[in-house]
Amino acid sequence: MTVTQERNLKISFADPYIVIGQAIIVNSDLKGEINSYKDLNDPKYTVISKLGTTGEQAAMSMIPKATYKAFETESEGAMEVLNGNADAFVYDLPFAELFMTQRGGSGSIFILNKPFTYEPLAWAVNKGDPDLLNWLNNFMAQIKNDGTYDAIYDKWIRSDAWLKEVE
């Protein structure tokens, strides 16, 4: 669940296990010209995201001068950049990483994979359960330090091999 101040009033959160802020898939023609979301803040650039998402909110509020288009699905939006019909696609980092794994080899796109928004995900716990919070935080610290977390991230985000198992 995304950690927010409003939610934090009702429940407790363990330490975030991942930050899925917004990343940007960019048309390779703009390599060297676009190094940050700020560089896209110009009407000459067409920026896309998925309708009704935090990616759309980020694009409209943080890149307001760009020409903006919304799509119903994240795949449609990202494909617009891959096919050269748009300059950039703003969406959650895990999707962008997986899309690059699947289609980035074409050389027609690159990724700005340092999120420009902060959207931490964490386990939500009923208030008044410090023992469970302690256990979850210690569990995450352990798997982040012993390599398990990186292996899980690589399998599910940086690789697409698992897709064959669910298709």
Image: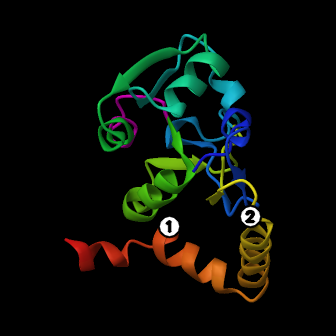
* In magenta stretch: residue 152: no
From this viewpoint, which residue is outermost toward the bottom? 146
Q: Quadrant of residue 136?
A: bottom right
Q: Which residues are magenta?
A: 80-89
- Label 2 sits on a secondary structure element that is loop
Which is nearer the eye, 59 or 133? Answer: 133
Question: Where residue 10 sits: x, y (%)?
Answer: 67, 41
Question: Where residue 70 sits: x, y (%)?
Answer: 38, 23
Q: Quadrant of residue 161?
A: bottom left
The residue to which callout 1 is attached is 157
State whether residue 68 is above or below residue 147: above
Which residue is at 52% across, 56% downward?
94
Name which residue type carries label 1. Ile
Which is nearer the eye, 122 or 23? Answer: 122
Which is nearer the eye, 2 or 25? Answer: 2
- Label 1 sits on a secondary structure element that is helix
Query: In the drawing, what numbered circle is on residue 129?
Result: 2
Question: Where residue 132 sits: x, y (%)?
Answer: 72, 71
State whether residue 1 is above or below residue 31: below
Question: Where residue 118 sits: x, y (%)?
Answer: 71, 41
State whether residue 157 is above or below residue 127: below
Which residue is at 63% across, 19% downward?
63
How crowded is the residue under tag 1: few (<14 C-alpha within 10 Å), some, or many (20+)? some
Name which residue type carries label 2. Asp
Q: How far, Cα to Cα, is label 1 from label 2?
A: 31 Å
From this viewpoint, which residue is outermost toward the left? 167
Whether tag 1 and tag 2 are in contact, CB under 8 A, the answer is no
